[in-house]
Image (cartoon, rainbow, N blue to C red):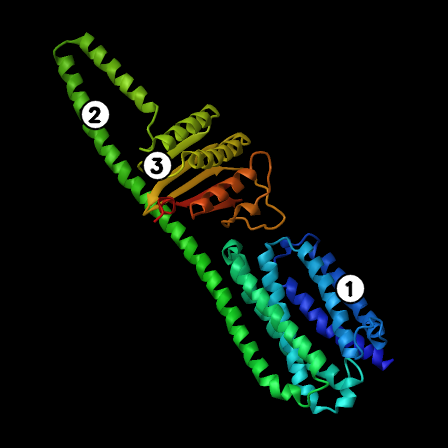
Amino acid sequence: MSFYLRQSIGFFLQIFPCVLLCFVPFHRKCFRWSYQTMRIAFIVFAIISSIVFPFCVKDSLFGLLENMSGRGNIYMLLVVSFMCTLYFYLVKEASVKKILVINLTLFYATTQYMVVNLFYPLFPIEFVQAEVYATPIFWLFVITTLLFFPIGYYFMNHIVREYLQEMNPNKMTKEFRNVQIITVLYLCMMLFYATMSKFYVENYWWLLGPPFLFVAAVLTVFYWNLLHESLFRQREDMNQRQLQIQQLQYKKIIGDIDTTRRLHHDMRHQLRRLYELLKQGQYKEMEHYLETLEQIVHQQESERFCKDSTLNSLLQYYIGWAREEDIDCSVDAYCDELVMDSVDLTSLIGNVLENAIHACQKIEKNRWIHIQIGMINASLAIQVDNSCDSIHFSRKKYQPEQFLSFDAFQSSDHVGNGLKSMDITAKKYGGSALFCYDEVKRTFTTRIRLNLNRELGE
């Protein structure tokens, strides 16, 4: 009886902390099931798999390895594979974030396993080989769990959680894929040596234990630097976008000042001319002059937003459409002729403004769209803000008031596919397309950056 109890508790101590660490970094809204239901389900599964464990390893049910430790590793691999599959389904987050958490958890489990194996040679080899969780090994797992789990929990809850909230997964996919490969190779190497070699080489772990500990320390530093770098990149990217918007606002202020000066200059000449005609009693000439001014004002109402003919035509069309829908529009566009495909420009601007107009059409009052377009060095920066009552987040993400990629939003009516099209166009020009919904202000913001130098081949 003590054998079965020790094997079950030992397996539970080795598997359940890892399961718990996988869910710690994510907010409760990121799960498909309720947090309480999911927690109970995984606890029950961990208990059942722990109870079944000693029955599967005592006799050679698998028929693959003669030693009990090998059968235990195979059973654990099957359980972990099932849990990882269920984990990927339940967590509504980007795959790269889930892979990162699994990698860190595997690293925790491997380090614990390595430390246990460093100390087991202190005990008689016959006694240790008798079962998977012999009494000394069982107590080593108890001690290492008490030592390592609080550290792992703190790291996942206070450090990894912060990185996952601010990290842009699209920028870190390649790096995390490399980390996944390194971690899996490290784990496989540990399992192979522990399972196949410890029975044939005397004092094996005393010989290779220190190098493994050194590798674990190096990987710890590597993980920390990777997370730090991802957060640094994200913040730098946000700061750069804020700088771009500030530069656009600065250009707008300068343009408004110049426009005001020109208006004052023109008005002064027009009033002087009207005063002269009135003083001379030339009323018909005054009437003709006023008609001419009206024609000029009417021509100005057709509004020339910028010097690029394609972009100006697109803005005239969509702004006219928006005003017909009683949508208040403001445009700040400062750019010369753009060196980019007119088809791409038409698709991009069309998707942005159509989405904005459709969102405003669903609102009874306070309909508005604000458009800012300008050149920042060699990049075309576009920001469109519009009133919006609600947005549909995809199941992968739910992070309101943060700038996210297109896949964070679910396609609904005209929204969704258009965002993906913007992202494709932006990436074609080496840029980016990010979107944000502010639930408090009821505002949807689109930010797009295009590197026009890429098109020039620079």
Front residue (pair 396, 149)? 396
* Residue type (three-letter) at the residue carrying disc 1: Phe
Rendered image: mark on residue 45: 1
Residue drawn at point x = 59 percent, y = 45 percent: 393
**Which residue position holds label 3?**
333
Q: x%, y% of residue 264?
A: 21, 29
Q: Secondary structure at mark 1?
A: helix
Which element type, helix, strand or loop, lies under badge 3?
Answer: strand
Apparent side of residue 16 relative to residue 289 in the rendered image (left or right)? right
Residue found 34% across the figure and 23% down from its top: 301
Where is residue 147 shown, x and y percent of the image?
64, 79
Q: Note whether 363 is above or below 382 in the view shown.
A: above
- Which of the two labelled residues, at mark 2 and mark 3, occupies the earlier sequence position? 2
Instruction: For marks 1 and 2, give the one nearer the viewer.
Output: 1
**For the residues bearing labels 1 and 2, Cβ distance under 8 angstroms:** no
Q: Quadrant of the N terminus?
A: bottom right
Label 2 SS: helix
Q: List the residue tagged with mark 2.
A: 267
Q: Amino acid at mark 3?
A: Ala
Q: Is residue 373 visible?
A: yes
Query: In terms of depth relative to the viewer, which is nearer, 315 or 403?
Result: 315
Report the side of 255 relative to 88 (left or right). Answer: left
